[in-house]
Amino acid sequence: MQKVDPKTLDANFFSLLSDRWALLTAADGTKCNPMTVSWGGTGILWNRPVATVYVRPQRYTYGLIEHEKYFSLSFLPEKYREVMALCGAKSGRDTDKVKECNLTVLEGEKAPCFAQAELTLVCRKLYAQSFDPACFADGTMDESFYPGKDYHRMYIGEIEAVLKG
Ligand SMILES: Cc1cc2nc3c(=O)[nH]c(=O)nc-3n(C[C@H](O)[C@H](O)[C@H](O)COP(=O)(O)O)c2cc1C
């Protein structure tokens, strides 16, 4: 794994997230639990490179990311499609997804990262806020995506390290 400056990346996060998906991973010290995400983004905020993810409250990951200072976003090659599907279907409450998917956790990073990833963003949490239904400018988003009122919580993290495999 090589550490690179985020400004040198030519990755297209639109297609990566929407077509290839990513693993969002936080650990509570004992349990490392990857969860598939396809909503999110990268950019600049408060003069820092940041990544944003959105987590519904019923996810096991919610408790982990809420509690932890760091999270990672891992992009795996296309051949790991089954891993991505499993991590987006099973919950860490019932399954050890790292074991089931044969993922190799890298030592020495501030959030769990995987040897199988071709690109990993290690992020330090800067800000978290749950969507407030009163703030939708277009109410159809609320109707379409939140019939159960399970509003995503947005986490913005400073990208402290970018690993290329
Ligand atoms: C392609 C795909 C994208 C997903 N994106 C998100 C997302 O951005 N946010 C979210 O909360 N759940 C998302 N999910 C659902 C979670 O990955 C799924 O509920 C997972 O089993 C939760 O795992 P956990 O309970 O171990 O945290 C997505 C699922 C798939 C298949």
Image: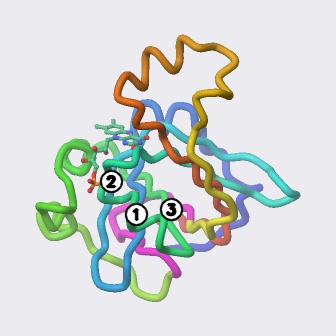
Task: Provide the residue designation for mark 3.
Answer: 120
First to last magenta residue range? 110-121
Q: Position of residue 25 (x, y in %)?
A: 40, 63
> Is residue 119 shown in magenta?
yes
**Secondary element type, mark 3:** strand
Question: Badge 3 local density, few (<14 within 10 Å), some, or many (20+)?
Answer: many
Task: Provide the residue designation for mark 2.
Answer: 35
Above or below, 120 against 69 in this view is above
Q: Is residue 71 left or right of residue 84?
A: right
> What residue type is disc 1 on?
Thr
Above or below, 116 against 68 in this view is above
> What residue type is disc 3 on?
Thr
The residue positioned 32% from the left and 42% from the top of the image is 78
Q: Is residue 35 left or right of residue 111?
A: left
**Nearer to us in this view, 131 or 28:** 131
Identify the main secondary structure in magenta.
Answer: loop
- Colouring method of the image: rainbow
